[in-house]
Image: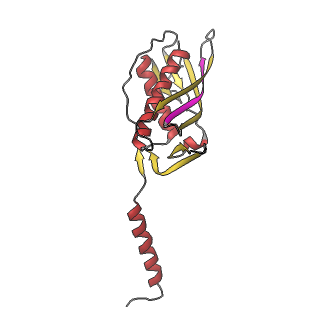
Amino acid sequence: MLNLTRFPLFLAVLGLSACSALQGDPLRYPVPDLQPAQKVRVGAYGSVELREVSLPEYATLAEMAVETPEGGITTQKTQLWADNPVRAVTLELTRHLSQITGLTVASQPWPFESTPDARVDVRIEQMLADRQNMFRLSGQIFVSPTEEGGRPRARFFSLSVPIAAPGDAQAMAAARGQIVQDLAVFIARNGLR
């Protein structure tokens, strides 16, 4: 026998289920795996530890961040990064640094018994798709030799790459992949030589 006192609740749950099924889950977009476009010779070090990359708060979210026409920052609720951005950028940068330089590069914590020759700390202050359809990345790098006599370095960077299709999540992911690779080249040339 049908219980009429619970029937309105049943209809409400059924309606919400149908609504969320029509909207679908947000899509997650991976950053494409890029092959190194160039090699950078580094003679000062043989091994490098990359500390966890520091990102601005909006860039740590799963939602892709974009600049509004008014200059504010908003996130795309239906367009998500495939991986935690802090983890992903740290691992991407580690891979690119290793491929570009040929050095042994590992992210923190250092997995080997020996001490790395240098540590790299990357602090990003801006990472987003801007209103001019460019993906921007800016901040500062710090390179600290672990041996006495090495020269510590600090360098500011400001990089940008065009987004091939404005507003397209896959194009934004491709631009982020390219700009992180560009950052690896910057670190190799300006911090590890």
x%, y% of residue 126? 58, 35
Q: Which quarter of the rendered picture does the N terminus lie within?
A: bottom left
State left or right for residue 57 relative to residue 20: right
Q: Position of residue 92 (x, y in %)?
A: 45, 31
At horizontal 50% and vertical 40% (from top left) the residue drawn is: 85
Q: Reply yes or no: does residue 12 show up in magenta.
A: no
* Rendered image coloring scheme: secondary structure
Residue most toward the bottom? 1
Q: How many marks?
A: 0
For the record, the magenta segment spans 134-146
Q: Is residue 143 magenta?
A: yes
Q: Is residue 100 above or below residue 32?
A: above
Residue 184 position, x and y percent, is 48, 23
Residue shown at the point (38%, 35%) measured from the top left: 32
Q: Quadrant of residue 158?
A: top right
Q: Does residue 160 appear left or right of residue 125 in this picture? A: left
Q: Is 99 situated above or below 171?
A: above
Q: Where is residue 111 in the image (x, y as percent from the top left)?
A: 49, 27
Closest to the observer: 10 or 1? Answer: 10
The answer to whether residue 71 is above or below residue 158 is: below
Most common secondary structure along the magenta stretch: strand
